[in-house]
Amino acid sequence: MFNQSSMGGFGGTATPSSANPMKDYEVVQPPEDSISSLAFSPATLPQNFLIAGSWDNNVRCWEIQQNGTSIPKSMQSCGGPVLDVAWSDDGTKVFMAGCDKQAKMWDLASNQVVQVAVHDAPIKTCHWIKAPNYSCLMTGSWDKTLKFWDTRSPNPMMSINLPERCYCADVDYPMAVVGTAGRQIIVYQLEGKPQEYKTLDSPLKYQHRCVAIFRDKKKVPTGYALGSVEGRVAIQFVNPANPKDNFTFKCHRSNGTPNGYQDIYAVNDIAFHPVHGTLATVGADGSFSFWDKDARTKLKPSELMEQPIVRCAFNNNGQIFAYAVSYDWSKGHEFYNAQKKNYIFLRPCYEELKPRTSS
């Protein structure tokens, strides 16, 4: 069990308590610039490894031990800010994509890096697809294309035109979903070969920021949660049994102010718990929240961090919740403070994400 008994092994300068209000475990040697992406290793590896991509052009890898200690393992540089990272299904490789318009494959055992994908503009998302008859890397770019690469050929297996720039995407075989500029949503089915399944109108009135696929009780991917810059999340079933199954909820908003105005913040990331099917949202307000979408209730709010929370991830067995605290530039350059560090925190979360028991 990822237990809270021993802190040990953090070293370095003491973190002010205001930066870690939830008293969670701090990952050592975090990125030097804003964190763009987080991903835990798949269940095929016995240990937990965490990778993080950053605007400092680097991808870092840590081993996360049961007592909350993080051990820096390795780091690789890219030719520009990293926008997304992903693991291969067997845990031997890490994919890194970003502003240099390339995706690279990092073989962890040999520490070699090769380019496996290229676009005409920065690559915003990368996901590994493992199908019975093929495996490939899916990349979504601001060049308005979605491409699929088998990593051995310089040319994509397939390229699909998007209506606009890719802003967010998720994959849970046999389903993929992509959110683009102009508030477009496209769902793909990946069985046999990737193909468009349906294009959907956004239930949200503001720009998409993040999307995460959820599964039904039989563990079949069945819908997605979509977060917008206007402090709102939409829960959408791809084929709702009842239109009322789809709904939106507000989050990451201030509780009102003396002048009567409410501050509304972007939902920066959404992650579903791999066991319980409940979800976490993180926002530009500097908080995370845990939710039960089926009971339509909030399970737990967090205290406010000193800076926005930009990304989050669960490890494969749902014991650990990781969240990254960085400036997201949501208030412009004048609010950037170089003195404020970037943090990745780890929280034992299995109990807190248990669904609300039906009375």
Image (cartoon, rainbow, N blue to C red):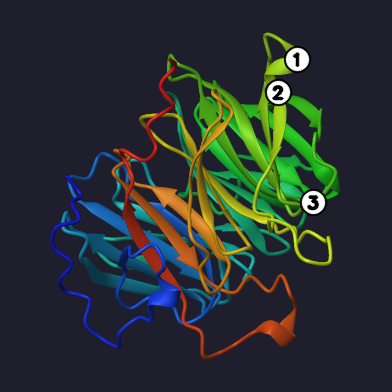
Q: Secondary structure at mark 2?
A: loop
Q: Position of residue 80 (x, y in %)?
A: 58, 76
Q: Nearer the viewer, mark 2 or mark 3?
A: 2
Give the quarter of the figure containing the N terminus: top left
On residue 246, which mark appears? 2
Mark 3 and mark 1: span between their CA atoms?
Answer: 23 Å
Mark 1 and mark 2: span between their CA atoms?
Answer: 6 Å
The amino acid type, in three-letter code, at marker 1 is: Pro
- What residue sits 73% from the left and 62% below the top? 120
On residue 207, which mark appears? 3
The amino acid type, in three-letter code, at marker 3 is: Gln
The residue indicated by pointer 1 is: 243
Taking the view exactly as shown, the residue that stands out farthest to the front is 258
Q: Closest to the observer: 72 or 20?
A: 20
Q: Earlier in the sequence, mark 2 or mark 3?
A: 3
Identify whether 216 is placed above or below 87. above
Residue 67 relative to residue 50: left or right: left
Q: Earlier in the sequence, mark 3 or mark 1?
A: 3
Q: Closest to the observer: 319 or 124?
A: 319
* Rendering quarter of residue 110: bottom left
The amino acid type, in three-letter code, at marker 2 is: Asn
Q: Nearer the viewer, mark 3 or mark 1?
A: 1
Identify whether 75 is placed above or below 47. below
Q: Closest to the observer: 156 or 342?
A: 342
Q: Closest to the observer: 108 or 267?
A: 267
Q: Secondary structure at mark 3?
A: loop
